[in-house]
Image: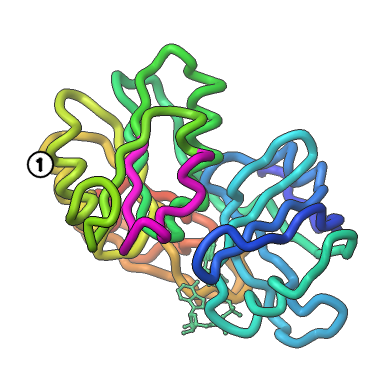
Amino acid sequence: MALQYLENGEILENEVVGPDTWRMAIRAPKITDAAQPGQFVMVAVGHESSDPLLRRPLSIHRAENDVLTLLYRIVGKGTKLMSHMKRGEDISLLGPLGKGFQLHATEHHCLVGGGLGVAPLLFLAKEIKRRLPDEKMTILLGGRNSKELLVLADFQHVAPVLVATDDGSQGLHGLITALLDQEISGPATIYTCGPSPMMKGVASLARHRNWPCQVSLETMMACGMGACLGCTVQRAGIDETEKKYVHVCKDGPVFEAGEIWL
Ligand SMILES: Cc1cc2nc3c(=O)[nH]c(=O)nc-3n(C[C@H](O)[C@H](O)[C@H](O)COP(=O)(O)OP(=O)(O)OC[C@H]3O[C@@H](n4cnc5c(N)ncnc54)[C@H](O)[C@@H]3O)c2cc1C
Ligand code: FES
């Protein structure tokens, strides 16, 4: 079993990078060293109090030189509390958790991210570049508008980036699935993370084009370790002899698209 750690990390940076979106860098050498792209950490957002009691799952955005970086959007109490934490304070992390993206040699790696779904894809892009430096990679990012194209410059440092926005303020005016359909031809492997309807659209196009496709799912999570059954999703196209449900926290969060959607 892969190593997991409960680590108290020092916050090195906690800053706004987009609408309601923050980036937190934490010195956490053990988790950083063990992390693989697509894995996540359970973060104790309550700081010194026990409220909220439950840790919150956040994807590993970067893992370099003993520093783990998270990209998070304020949606409720826990993430609001995180945004109040200051440089120099400690934060408790549990991880790295879950099964991340599988990297195989392929003719063209295509990373497709929508909104906050870009969070795990930067680590993945950097890892593809490091481990498979000669292979072609294209990153496709989508958002409601240009401000929602998060950490775009960080991706542009790694590989060519194509963008789509719902309002046409940057890149293709339309959905990221249209961009994928127009711009990518020939054999490719797809890695996607974002809102569920977007990932379903990407998975459907991948199926038609015979592209292997990995999807990173998001569900509510209480424990993050397979103990509470709070994160189960039904598998697609199984017969009675096969396992009907998977735990997103333990069996995922990254799955082959065909395992979840037909
Ligand atoms: C594997 C995994 C990776 C994630 N990675 C990131 C990430 O990198 N960046 C990021 O900003 N968020 C990520 N999330 C979502 C993040 O965990 C939630 O936004 C966070 O837990 C909300 O906590 P809160 O206390 O602020 O909100 P709460 O007060 O708990 O909830 C506020 C609202 O958000 C909804 N919500 C809470 N948790 C989730 C969830 N997991 N999925 C969908 N809706 C939810 C609630 O139903 C409620 O409507 C990830 C979730 C999973 C399962
Ligand atoms: S979050 Fe508890 S089993 Fe997955």
Front in this rendered view, residue 26 or 215: 26
| Quarter occupied by the N terminus | top right
Residue sitting at x 10%, y 41%: 208
Q: Residue at x 73, y 50 (%)?
A: 4
Location of residue 17 with respect to 122 vertically, above or below: below
Would you say 249 lies left or right of 165 here?
right
Q: Which SS class for mark 1?
A: helix
| Residue at the spot of label 1 | 208
* Left or right: 249 as drawn, with respect to 111: right
Q: Quadrant of residue 174?
A: bottom left
Q: Magenta stretch: residue 82 in it?
A: no
Asked whether the viewer can see residue 261, the reply is no
Q: Nearer the viewer, residue 43 or 23?
A: 23
Residue 245 on image: x %, y %: 37, 65
The amino acid marked with disc number 1 is His
Quarter holding the C terminus is bottom left
Residue lying at the far front of the rendered structure: 169
240 lies above or below 215: below
Residue 57 rendering spot, x and y as whole percentages: 60, 66
State the extent of the magenta-drawn residues as a range: 139-154
Residue 10 horizontal/vertical position (percent): 86, 56
- Residue furthest to the top in view is 134
Please tell me whether residue 213 is drawn above or below residue 164 in the rendered image: above
Q: Residue at x 81, y 48 (%)?
A: 28
Q: Nearer the viewer, residue 85 or 189?
A: 85
